[in-house]
């Protein structure tokens, strides 16, 4: 039995690290346990897009705005490469353009989204005319983008070296109970224990998590090299994303976009495909994604799904691309809301995301949950 800690965290993904930061900056003694030698889950398989613009008004938009500030601080203190130029959402059709116009005219003003709609000459001049084949572009100025594979290790180094967070990697946590955590590295005492288990609903707190009826979402993703040197400094989306992200999906104009997808490209709806493109620091692009929901993540990728995404990417970019890497992203999905904080037993909680925006809202969720556990107003 080791020395007592204030907080024990299971999982070194973005939620686990966010809770660790929130506690450590308050001067609390924190230990983090991760079953692999380095984070390998959803937090490093993603696009690194920390989106504010796509979040629906209310709690998610508030969390994304708070998280934006935290990411900015982490970039300074931990040396993260963080692009703060925003993202462009391209309208490829008249229906998509009308949806963006309606969003800017009403919701964006009512809720203070920091956006600009580029049309006409402004659209033709974007990136020297590379994207002039699109009708319009919504510039979400508050959106950020990072390279998750490097950002998480940098954040771990900062937490370890500057905030004295103790990490136990390659350590499986077998069980948790009030005040005690049992692992392959021994048993540990802690005032509070938070399980940030991603999409693993069976190893720990299985009965409590089963009551949420969560599922798993599997994504097909690619890293590719464009045929042209685009020097891309913004994350890119298309109007397909408007039927997926809550900032747009419930607007009346979204119905026409969805109808057009079902009429002209039903396979995109069937496989949950909406194009996202993120530049890496090395001139490559992360491209995706598809959405396949279920209780387990199938290990088998569909080549046709990749081909559809590549076709969309080449149409969007206006150039050819060469794939250099393929993988699956897997995250927890479809719980009772976009996220959950479950008090499973005295001093034992679980923090879960039920949607794929952990990078966008996770930092602020950590702050909120730690404040609640330690009785802050």
Image: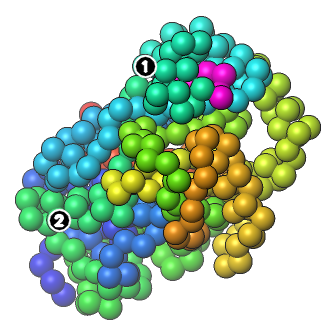
Residue 85 percent across, percent down from the top left: 35, 32
Which element carries disc 2, helix, strand or loop? helix
47 horizontally vs 373: left or right? right
- Crowding around mark 1 (Cα neighbors within 10 Å: few <14, some 14 to 19, many 20+) is some
Quadrant where the C terminus sits is top left
The N terminus appears in which quarter of the rendering? Answer: bottom left
Give the percent coordinates (x, y) of residue 82.
29, 45
Residue placed furthest toward the right: 263
Q: Nearer the viewer, residue 94 or 349?
A: 94
Question: Is residue 134 rendered magenta in the image?
Answer: yes
Q: Residue at x 61, y 41 (%)?
A: 318
203 in relation to 257, above or below: below
Q: Identify the residue at horizontal 10%, vertical 59% (top origin).
A: 163
Residue 150 lies, with reference to residue 104, above or below; the image says below
Q: Circle 1 is placed at which residue position?
A: 114
CA gap between label 2 and label 1 equals 32 Å
User: Residue 145, percent across and down?
Assistant: 38, 44
- Describe residue 99's horizontal placement relative to residue 70 as left or right: right
Q: Mark yes or no: residue 126 visible.
A: yes
The residue carrying mark 2 is: 157
Q: Residue at x 17, y 61 (%)?
A: 159
Residue 278 sits inside the magenta stretch: no
Q: Identify the element where label 1 is drawn.
A: loop
Which label's residue is closer to the chain start, 2 or 1?
1
Q: Is residue 345 visible?
A: no
Residue in view at x 52 percent, y 70 percent: 325
User: Which label sits on residue 302?
Assistant: none
Q: Quadrant of residue 293?
A: bottom right
Magenta-tinted stretch: 133-139
Q: Residues within 10 Å of mark 2 (few under 14, many from 20)?
A: some
């Amino acid at each position: 039995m080791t020395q007592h800690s204030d907080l024990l965290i299971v999982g070194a993904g973005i939620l686990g690290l966010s809770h660790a930061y929130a506690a450590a900056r308050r001067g609390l003694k924190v230990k983090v346990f991760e079953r692999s030698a380095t984070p390998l889950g959803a937090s490093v398989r993603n696009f690194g897009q920390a989106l504010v613009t796509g979040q629906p008004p209310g709690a998610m938009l508030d969390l994304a705005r708070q998280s934006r500030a935290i990411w900015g601080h982490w970039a300074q203190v931990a040396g993260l490469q963080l692009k703060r130029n925003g993202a462009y959402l391209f309208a490829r059709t008249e229906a998509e353009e009308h949806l963006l116009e309606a969003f800017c005219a009403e919701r964006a003003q009512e809720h203070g989204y920091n956006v600009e709609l580029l049309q006409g000459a402004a659209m033709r001049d974007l990136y020297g005319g590379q994207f002039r084949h699109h009708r319009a572009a919504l510039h979400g100025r508050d959106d950020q983008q990072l390279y998750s594979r490097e950002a998480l290790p940098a954040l771990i180094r900062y937490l370890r070296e500057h905030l004295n967070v103790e990490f136990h990697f390659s350590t499986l946590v077998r069980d948790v109970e009030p005040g005690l955590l049992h692992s392959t590295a021994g048993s540990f005492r802690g005032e509070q224990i938070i399980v940030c288990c991603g999409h693993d609903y069976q190893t720990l707190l299985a009965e409590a998590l089963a009551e949420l009826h969560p599922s798993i979402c599997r994504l097909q993703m690619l890293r590719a090299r464009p045929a042209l040197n685009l020097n891309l400094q913004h994350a890119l989306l298309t109007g397909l994303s408007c039927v997926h992200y809550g900032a747009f999906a419930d607007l009346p104009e979204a119905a026409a976009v969805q109808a057009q997808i079902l009429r002209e490209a039903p396979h995109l709806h069937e496989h949950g495909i909406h194009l996202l493109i993120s530049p890496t620091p090395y001139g490559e692009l992360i491209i995706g994604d598809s959405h396949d929901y279920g209780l387990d993540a199938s290990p088998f990728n569909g080549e046709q799904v990749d081909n559809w995404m590549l076709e969309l990417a080449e149409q969007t970019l206006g150039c050819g691309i060469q794939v250099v890497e393929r993988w699956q992203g897997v995250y927890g999905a479809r719980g009772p809301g976009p996220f959950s904080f479950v008090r499973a037993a005295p001093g034992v909680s679980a923090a879960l995301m039920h949607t794929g925006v952990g990078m966008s809202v996770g930092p602020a969720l950590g702050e909120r949950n730690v404040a609640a556990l330690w009785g802050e107003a």
